[in-house]
Structures are given as structure tokens and as C-alpha cells.
Amino acid sequence: MFLGTMRRWTLIAALAAVASFASAQSGTLELAVDSSPAGLDPHVVTAFSSVAILGQIYDGLMEINADLQLEPALATGYTVSDDGLTYTFTLREGVVFHNGRPMTAADVVYSYERIVDVDTGSPVASRFAQVASVAALDDLTVEIVLTAPFAPFLQNTVFLTVVPREVVEANDGSLQQVAVGTGPFMLSEVVPDTYTLLTANPDYYRPGQPGVAAVRYNIVPEASTRAAGLRTGAYHLIPDVDPATAQTLGNVAGVTLLGIQELSYSLIGMNATRPPFDDPRVRRALNLALDREEIVEAVYFGNAVPGGPLSPALTDWALPTSEYSCYAPDAATARELLTLAGYPDGVDFEIVTLGSLRVVVDTAQVVQAQLVAAGFNATVTVEEVGNFVQRWRNGDFDAFASLNGGNPDPDGYLDRTFRSDGSTNVFKYSNPAVDTLLTAGQRATDFAARQGIYADLQRALACDGPVAHVAYATLFTAHADDVNGFEQMPTRGLRYLRNVTLN
């Protein structure tokens, strides 16, 4: 069940706990966001609208900073055995959950077990496929043993979000409507389709943080209304400003517009087991039918770059798009491929899209128009977030248009997305050669060798894979000048809300 169907509810205990602490902070930070969270379970949800909130409530063993480097979170440090298989993490002392119970190594073990439990259906489960065992050596020491050397492992500990067993069990195994973590803010109130209120955690383990007494995520679907509210002072910060609105806010007095090359990308995803996209020639034809430069201008007002399987923000990994033969628009060749695949009269199919994100809808509509010349007749179906996520998870689509998040390590995106049994391989794509390369990239310990492997993967996936990568945008964030301490992240994460103070 999603939050749109929830009745209003309040965690009185959380409010009471904050009362004695509120004097250390000042004010409520008012955010304007486009949609309600699509659930609150940190081991299950993938929607940006949920992740933006859950990042304030929960912690992992490690975290990523604005420079895409690892830093301690619940773990203060670690050691690695000589054979590279055993990682021993030391946990912070004095960390407590929002319900007042101390967090221990047993909670890390339970959280790992919940993530990899098939009944949980966690999309991050495949990030831990190389883990043989997780054990609590004592209350503040966790030992994780791998089945084989695994280069991306430390990056993946960011996703080992720690939850309390008793809260899961008290809610019949689901955290979709409750949230009790160790982060800087506590879930206080949810008013469906109106706002989500978080209040400062008085026991947060980082001294002096958070810097505000509360954060309110105001649900404001219309971009123009969000922008107007920022200008008038109703809102302090808009974390994701669409390109058209950014054009106007950049010149508004009292407003600061930030921009950064993001890891997330727009895409057309294809169901590799459903005609016509079960044929790689049709997938290549769709790529050839796209004019990515036109999409960058029409949808992003030039504030994006055409991109392949990895973001250009990953300068050590991403290949230039000139490497991909299917990126030069060629409708005639696309038609020839459709004929060879058995579709001389073209193909009809549906593109499912997420209605809450303007750039996604705009991208789908521009793509729909571009495909006609190549013989594709696409119908665009705009879904609300709950229906879209359900269809996405179930693989219930011919194709979809959406935004996907990237990862600082290429394995963090490519493996879960394109491995035959990857936990976000909703495309049902299976390619033994790709699986072999993915495993090689995980096992390689030499950096240059990994670069070569991921270059081969990008070439294999760009034209014939189940995803037509479209564009990597400039992520814009706008905030009032009385907001101090906020910093953007290429991941779209809002980690630095905990640093914010208000004048």
C-alpha cells in the first residue's frame, strides 16, 4: 500500500522527544517537492520521492559525500583480511534508534538478512550477492565475509541501511508506513498528498546536527507553484528544479540557483522478453531513431548531455558517445532493421511514463514524435507514481520512460540492472556474455583492468541492451538566500540537509 492511500497519522513520541532539543535548532526548513513518497521501506523503495526522505531517517554502514567519496556513517572504520575476503567493521558507540533503543551489530546482521530475504523483494539485494556471511562479533563489531574478492563491496555498504527488528515485526514485516532509523531527522507526520514532516533527532550522533528543528516536504505537483512559493518565501528550497523553471529562477533576487552534473539519466527501458523488443535488432533500431541532441535542447533547454550507460560525471569510467554507432540518428537504417526483424510495416507499442516528473513526460513525447520516421508507432501512457512503480517492478510494460539513478562505482548501476538475475533487471534481459563481463569487473583488483572491462560492457549495452540511455542533465537546486550550509550531490541525495541552518 502506498502513502497516497494512508490516513493522516502522527508519531506523538517523536514530537515529544524533540521538544527538549528544539532550542538547539532554529525553524522549519520548508521544501517543495513534486510528489508524495511511494512508500517508506528503505530496503524496498526506489522512487526519488521516497529516497529523498529516507536519507534523512536512516543510515548505512558508510555514506557517499559530494565528491563521490566514501565516508564513515554507522561504521567508524574497517579492516580487510590479506585475502580480501573478510571485512571487519567497527560501529559507532552511543548510536540509538529513534525509538530510544541502542543500535548494535545485531541490527546490522538483521538488516542484511532482511535485504537478501527473497520475501522482502529488495532491489538492492544483488549488491550483496557476493556476501557469504555477516556476523556480530560483539555489540560494536561486524564481520562480513565474501565468497570471492569483490571490488565494489565498500561502495555497496552505503545500501546496508540499518533498521530495528522490533519495528519490522510490529508492522507485519513491512516498513512502508513507518520509519524508525538512526538518522538526523525522525518521521513525525504524514498528510497524504500534502506534506511529510520530519523533526530533529535529539540523539543524533553527529554533534551540532541537524541545524534546523524540522524539515517539511511540501507536495506541490506544479513546477510554477513551487517556483512562486520560493519567490514569496513560502518555501526555502526546491531540491530538483526542472530546466524550464531554472531558466527563470536563475535571475530572481533572493534566490540562489545551484547546478551540478548528475549521475541520474533519462531513459527508454524496453522489455526484452516481450515483442517487439525481444529482438536486439529492434532495440538497436529504436536507438537509431532517437535524436538525443534534439531531446537535450527541447526538454532540457541545453542543460544536459547525451549519454550512454555511464554518466560523464564518472570521468574515470564513462566512454564518449562517439564510441556508439547507434547514436547517430538514422531513420532509414532503423527501418531496415525493423524489416529484418520481421516488422516491414513498423511496430506499435506502449511507452509507460511517470506523470509526476515533467522532464520524463516531455522526453516521452519528444521520443514518440522522433520514432515515427523509423516506423515506430508509440502510445504514451502517463501513470501516477504508485501505478508506475508497480508496473515497473512487475515488468508490466512494452517500454517505459523514466529517470534512473547512477552510482559512483560502475558496478553499482550495471550489475543490478543488466545481470540476468539483477535485482532491478525489470527488463528481463539476459546475456551470458554481459554476465561474464560483470563478474570480471567485480573480481578485478587492478584499476586499469576494471576500466577495460567496463568499457567493453558499455559498448555491449549501449545499442543492443534493454535501455536506450538518453541524457544526463544538469541537476538544478534552488534555495532562498537565508538557507546556509546546503550542498548538492551528483546522486540527487539530500545528505547535506543535516548541515542547513536558517538565518
Image: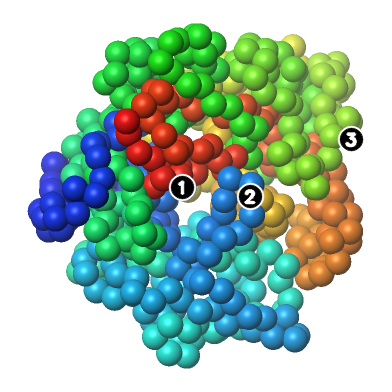
Q: Residue at x 14, y 42 (%)?
A: 7
Disc ID at residue 68 = 2
Secondary structure, mark 3, is helix
N-term-proximal mark, 1 vs 2 = 2
Of mark 1 and mark 3, the one earlier in the sequence is 3
Q: Residues within 10 Å of mark 1 (few under 14, many from 20)?
A: many
Few, some or many C-alpha atoms within 10 Å of disc 3 (few <14, some 14-19, many ≥20)? few
Residue depicted at 67% across the width and 15% down the height: 302
Where does label 1 land, which residue? 495
Q: CA distance from mark 1 to mark 2?
A: 12 Å
* Residue at mark 1 to residue at mark 3: CA–CA distance: 35 Å
**Which residue is depicted at the point 64% across and 47% down?**
67
Label 3, label 2: how many angstroms apart (C-alpha)? 25 Å
Q: Is residue 432 left or right of residue 229?
A: right
* Residue carrying label 3: 323
Are circles 1 and 2 on residues that touch, CB within 8 Å? no
Of badges 3 and 2, nearer the viewer stands 2
Measured along the vertical axis of the image, is residue 48 above or below residue 297? below
The x and y percentages for residue 171 are: 22, 64
The kind of residue on which mark 2 rests is Leu
Residue 4 image position (x, y, % from top left): 25, 38
The answer to whether residue 85 is above or below residue 306 is below
Frontmost residue, 238 versus 108: 238
Q: Does residue 234 appear in this view?
A: yes
